[in-house]
Image (tube, rainbow, N blue to C red):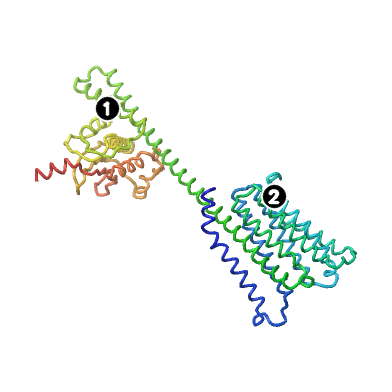
Amino acid sequence: MPQLQATLRTTDGRQLGLPTATMIVVLLVLLGQDVAGPELGLAAVAVMSALFADIGVLCAGILLYAHWRVGLASTTAWLVTAVVAFSLQGLHWFVLTLGTGPPLAEHAAWVAGYQIVATLGLCLLVTQSEELPGGRDPLVLGLLVGLLVTTGRMLLLELPLSAPPRGAYVAAGVGLTLICVVNAVALARSRAFSPWLRRRLCAATILLGLGQAAAFPEQAPAWLTIVSIATNLVGAAVLVAAAFMLARRSAQNEEEAIAVLHRRLEVAEMDHHDDQARLHEVRATVAGLSSATRLLHHHSSISELRRSQLEQMMEAELDRMTRLICGRPTTPPGPVDLDRVLEPVVVRHRAAGRRIDWEPTGATALGRADDIAEIVSILLANAQRHAASSRVELLVRTAHGSVEVVVGDAGPGVDRQLRRAIFEWGGRSPSSSGEGVGLASARLLSLDLGGYLKLDDRAGPGATFVLGLPMAEEALRDRARTA
């Protein structure tokens, strides 16, 4: 709410200026004898200004309705109802004035008295809105209330009422003005709306009430008619400006809420993808550890060297899986000994029966050991899934200032139509038994390390994936010293 109030204060003057200037221009055009012609009298100007004011009030009601549609506050709903009803009965009054005759003029005081009751009733809808039930469409209800008010006025005009005493019109006009002041005081005391809106509703109530006081320009003095014209136009401008700012702010709040939901959805989707990737790698690691366990317990002919390798692999992979379950590290990439990272992964996959050709190289790259191990494990598992009968070659090389880890097989390769899709989340061939998680996760990890993961199209038959990692500073210095 404080942010809303600050926004409204900063834009209040600009937004009020446009409708006010429009109303003043209309008034000047109507009063300009050179433009409108000498036959245009003050009474006609008053009637036309009332029409423009009622149209402005109706626009304000529609804008307030848009504001209500966002927040669905019951207090705003009753404000919409009152504003729409007020504008509708005002437009009906304009229609009646088009056929002004003696019967209408004779009922001036009675109609003004009726207008006092109607204005009081509409204001009560607003001031008592906190205690009134909601749940109805305020625009439709406003049209119904406005129709009810106009029906009552039409019935009043049909009654055979005697002409009121002299001066009754002036008394009715004064009473109409006073009831609008009373309504403004009631609005000022109401806690149904913010102070910012209460002030503008009070101003609009008084101004539009003064405008109604000269509903019969023929009976009103000239000065009161001029005041009526001005207050009608300015009162409508105040109401339109306030309604426009509320509707605009509601639209902005709605856009901000949608943007927040989109961000939360993106975060939730990323978290879901991360959980899927971790579960994918945990399942693969558990399968490899299970194979190693069976070798250790059911094959007594395993050499001591092989047994030692399996035990070291199991310890390293269990530690990595524990860290993976606890969450991915947020530490920046650092120098990594690729031999120490790749050896447990290779041993685990060999224990599962995969034929992998790999030799230590002593290469160092910039990255995170667990992430590099996960990427290479995904590539080896992918090769086994799609080229189970093929040997897999795992080698490390330097190229274009990067350290590249290459995983290649002699299987059927990747269909050209799927080469881009395989790195997208859920992307896989229709015949694949995978979930489309591994390669997408591996590419995201490689990008997070400042490297890349790509499919090498020039590697010949089979599928060859290349993981590129930045060279570590130590490796760069070693190359500089040996150059």
Name the residue that disc number 2 marks: 127
Q: CA distance from mark 2 to mark 1?
A: 73 Å
Residue 209, quarter of picture: bottom right
- Residue positioned most to the left: 482
Name the residue that disc number 1 marks: 316
Q: Mark 1 is on which residue type?
A: Ala
Q: Mark 2 is on which residue type?
A: Thr
Q: Residue at x 31, y 44 (%)?
A: 447
Q: Residue at x 54, y 48 (%)?
A: 1
Residue 148, quarter of picture: bottom right
Instruction: Report helix, strand or loop for mark 2.
Output: helix
From this viewpoint, is residue 458 visible?
yes
Q: Residue at x 77, y 70 (%)?
A: 220
Q: Position of residue 393 (x, y in %)?
A: 23, 38
- From the viewer's perspective, is residue 348 above or below residue 55? above
Instruction: Report helix, strand or loop for mark 1.
Output: helix
Depth check: 55 or 292 in front? 55
Task: Check if mark 2's residue and mark 1's residue have beta carbons within 8 Å.
Answer: no
CA neighbours of label 2 inside 10 A, class few (<14), some (14 to 19), many (20+): many
CA neighbours of label 1 inside 10 A, class few (<14), some (14 to 19), many (20+): some
**Earlier residue among tags 2 and 1:** 2
Q: Position of residue 258 (x, y in %)?
A: 51, 48
Q: Residue at x 62, y 69 (%)?
A: 23
